[in-house]
Amino acid sequence: MVRGKRREDLSQSREFAPDVLGYGVDYARVFPDPAGVPELPDVSVYIERMSALLTGRELKGFRCPSPFLVRTFDPPTRELVGKRVVGFRRLGKRIVWQFEGDLWLVLHLMIAGRLRWGPRGAPIQKKLGLAAFDFEHGTLTLTEAGTKKRASLHVVRGEEALRAHDRGGVEPLEISLDQFREALTRENRTLKRALTDPRIFSGIGNAYSDEILFHAQLSPVQRTGLLKPEQIEELYGAVRSTLELWTQRLRDEVGDGFPEKVTAFRKEMAVHGRYKEPCPVCGTAVQRIRHADNEVNYCPRCQTAGKLLADRSLSRLLKADWPRSIDELEDRQEEIAKQREPAPPKPPPPKPASPKTRARASSRTQAAAGGSTKVPKKVAKKATTRPAKKAAQKPGPA
């Protein structure tokens, strides 16, 4: 039934509409999203651990069985072998390696790309493995889950060529309030789009933008051009505190090891990935907007004054049935839950009376009416012969 449909088309089908009102199948749970793109905190911790392990080390070998990973041919990747790693830096969500000879390697993990540190000469996984960087004390392997190979690796020469990979966004942890205000209000966009646009802010993605907006208590669809000065200041503080908090959490989690569980969905998060779970502040069920592969999570009472935000597919599908507020949604969900409650079980039918019981009832009826109280012969015979048979079956005393 679903095999021939594209995932984007399922959002237009009522059968596979998200379970907002309490009916239907949640297609987002049938087709779960990957772990999410590593963002500023994740990439920063990656770079810290890679710097501690690989800075000053010579690259002994580079293995790349995947034809989809390397996106450049000049300079070739073989020029990196035999060169020492000078250092690392972050460029948005990209990890930049600096080698001797003014060579730069730009690695973008995209959604499902992950790095793993192992013993020297560690094999590349058959289905997930993309490449391996061999050093004298270990091997760094690159894997990517899923069938869509989106991770990319570019090798360039000189910092001028490296700048071509910079999307131009400002570093959110390195700017002042005035610089933040200027970047945020440069275009009149929704807050969600402004925070995740790499041309405006560097390194912020879908997960941490949800957390930032929740702590700032701002709607994800609020227009940047309509923000008050105090709201911009509150958002600036939320950006810094959220990114610094999660960077330190991930740093403490990794310790002296290497990041193993890099994901955009963590149980400590307030709203991201917590659809239908209670808000940590007010207890209201977290809501979401889904469009294609993107998802926005928010608390309607803390961020939108109780208003339920509409999306591009489900609200058009439900039209007048789409609830306008979280209170209306909760009332409808209660009504649907009551309709789904099973009906009380019917009492079992009475057992048929035995012939002896019917005979006694008949005799009482006749006696009350002044008729004969004589028990029918068949019934009397059964009543007298059954105990006799049972008594005959019992052995007598020795």
Image (cartoon, helix red, strand yellow):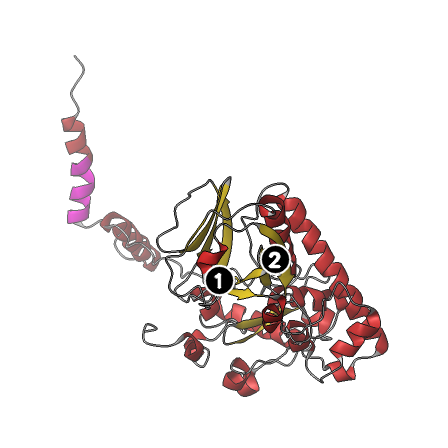
Callout 1: helix, strand or loop? loop
Is residue 378 depicted above or below 199 in this figure?
above
Q: Is residue 137 left or right of residue 302?
A: left
SS majority, magenta: helix
State whether residue 145 appears in this view. Answer: yes
* Dot 2 or dot 1, earlier in sequence: 1
> Any mark on residue 277, and which?
none
**Residue 166 or 218: which is nearer the viewer?**
166
Which one is in front in this view, the residue at disc 2 or the one at disc 1? 2
Q: Quadrant of the N terminus?
A: bottom left
Q: Amino acid at mark 1?
A: Pro
> Any mark on residue 43, and which?
2
Residue at the image position 59 percent from the left and 73 percent from the top: 164
Q: Amino acid at mark 2?
A: Val
Residue 138 in the image: state x and y as whole percent. Answer: 49, 42
Q: CA distance from mark 2 to mark 1?
A: 17 Å
Magenta residue check for 343? no
Query: What residue is disc 1 on?
Result: 34
Magenta residue check for 384? yes
Q: Quadrant of the C terminus?
A: top left
In magenta, the rendered stretch is 378-386
